[in-house]
Amino acid sequence: MQINELPLTGCFLLQPRVFQDIRGRFVKSLVASQFKALGLRTDFVEQYHSTSKTGVIRGMHFQAPPHEHAKLVYCAAGAITDVMLDLRKHSPTFGQAFALHLSAESGHALYIAAGVAHGFKATEEPALLIYNVTSEYAPEHDEGIRWDSFGFDWGLETPVISERDRNFPALADFTSRF
């Protein structure tokens, strides 16, 4: 597996070897020894998934301290534009966003540091995103930043967005606890 640091501090693109033959595909999405060599967490305690239709935007989500978590995410079917936003006030990349394409075909995954909000736009359906997180869901610490408040061009005129995601505060109105 090749692991490349992304422009947001503590976030990485994971490029595993993809094995394909007449049976189908095989992708290894986690190698603990490689993660540990880079100081990345491997103590994932929950795994969940979402499916989305083309044109859906989910995000920008995070859990606030003391229940913040790192995430390992990958697209198991379809494709997405994945977006990360650094909310860590002492980070050199605070307030910056970064996006890249994830697809089932590539097998690529993202390691997203705690304190980085996460969201995505489904670009090929069904977009099946798998999430592994290092803390359990804590509803009272489940927060977000409004998807259209930090200068990222999602490339959609009429995205499908949940009422909850529409009502998150703008980045300019957010006081970071990270």
Image: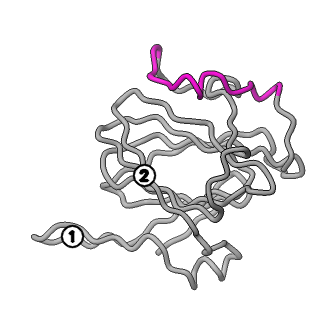
| Residue drawn where x is 28% and y is 71% of the image | 26
Element under disc 1:
strand
Residue pointed to by mark 1: 20
In x, y percent, where is residue 153? 57, 25
Within-10-Å neighbours for mark 1: few <14, some 14–19, many 20+: few
Q: Residue 5: within the magenta?
A: no
Q: Residue furthest bottom?
A: 33
| Residues in magenta, as a range | 157-173
Which residue is the site of mark 2?
A: 49
Residue 90, percent from left and from top: 89, 51
Residue type beneath disc 2: His
Q: Secondary structure at mark 2?
A: strand
Residue 151 or residue 146, whichever sits in front: 146
Dot 2 or dot 1, earlier in sequence: 1
| Label 2: few (<14), some (14–19) or many (≥20) C-alpha neighbours in 10 Å | few
Q: How is the image coloured?
A: one colour
